[in-house]
Amino acid sequence: MSTQLQQEQSVKSAERSTAALAVAVAAYIAAVVLANVVTERLGLVSVGFGLLVTAGTYAAGFALLARDFVHRFGGRGWALAAIAIGGVTSWALSSPALAVASTVAFVSAELVDLVIYEPIRRAKGFIQGALVSNLVSAPIDTFVFLSLAGFPLTLETVGGQFVGKVLWATVLPLSLYWLWRRYSSSRS
């Protein structure tokens, strides 16, 4: 009887993981598309405190985190596939200059994120892996994208990108995820 129960629990767990992977992949690709479309249309926007960001900064920052979730639920192969799809999508949906900047920035930052995330996740857990890998990959994405897309590299633009990608698109969602996991485990 316990074997049947274990098998049922295993099937339910696999179904949840498959659903979580599908959501993570969809969120990643949607974030890549949104980042490019909004930046293409609006360029630089003010976020207050004298800081400027490309209009798609929050979506681009969220893409870094969504890739970590793809990696968590699907492994390295799925993460690499999502990066490739994100790069192709960036290329297809943008002007030539923005397409080059976006594709090179996304692929560069995501590959660095991928390499850093996995060993830290194994040693310290998902949240620490995602946080540290995003702290490293966000500046890479920022400098590569801004310089290739022709946006100014100033304290205002780099600072704004960092706040958007790290604080609002990484720390806040990871904090909410941590709270949700804590709440879920307390109910079990």
Image: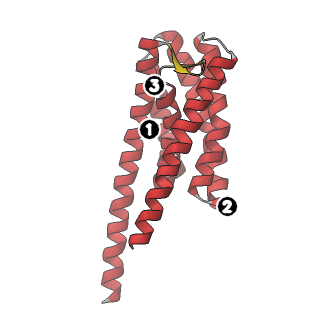
The type of residue carrying mark 3 is Ala
Q: Residues within 10 Å of mark 1 (few under 14, many from 20)?
A: many
Which residue: 43% across, 71% down?
186
Q: Residues within 10 Å of mark 3 (few under 14, many from 20)?
A: many
Q: Which residue reaches farthest bottom?
A: 1
Task: Residue 123: give its label.
Answer: 2
Q: Nearer the viewer, mark 3 or mark 1?
A: 3
How far apart, in angstroms, are the residues tagged by discs 3 and 2? Answer: 32 Å
Q: Which residue is mark 3?
A: 35
Residue 62 seen in render: yes
Marks 3,2: beta carbons within 8 A: no
Placement of the N terminus among the 4 image quadrants: bottom left
Q: Which one is nearer the viewer's eye here, 57 or 155?
A: 155
Count of picture labels: 3
Q: Say which label, 3 or 2, has the lower sequence index.
A: 3
Which residue: 47% across, 47% down?
70
How far apart, in angstroms, are the residues tagged by discs 3 and 1? Answer: 11 Å
Q: Circle 1 sits in a helix, a strand or a loop, which is it?
A: helix
Q: Which one is nearer the viewer's eye here, 3 or 46?
A: 46
Q: Which residue is mark 1?
A: 28
Placement of the C terminus among the 4 image quadrants: bottom left
174 is higher (above) or lower (below) than 55: below
Q: Circle 2 sits in a helix, a strand or a loop, which is it?
A: helix
Which residue: 66% across, 29% down?
140
The type of residue carrying mark 1 is Tyr
- Residue 164: x and y in percent read 55, 30
34 is higher (above) or lower (below) than 148: below
Marks 2,1: beta carbons within 8 A: no
Q: Say which label, 3 or 1, has the lower sequence index.
A: 1
38 is higher (above) or lower (below) than 137: above
187 is higher (above) or lower (below) than 154: below
- Residue 29: x and y in percent read 41, 34
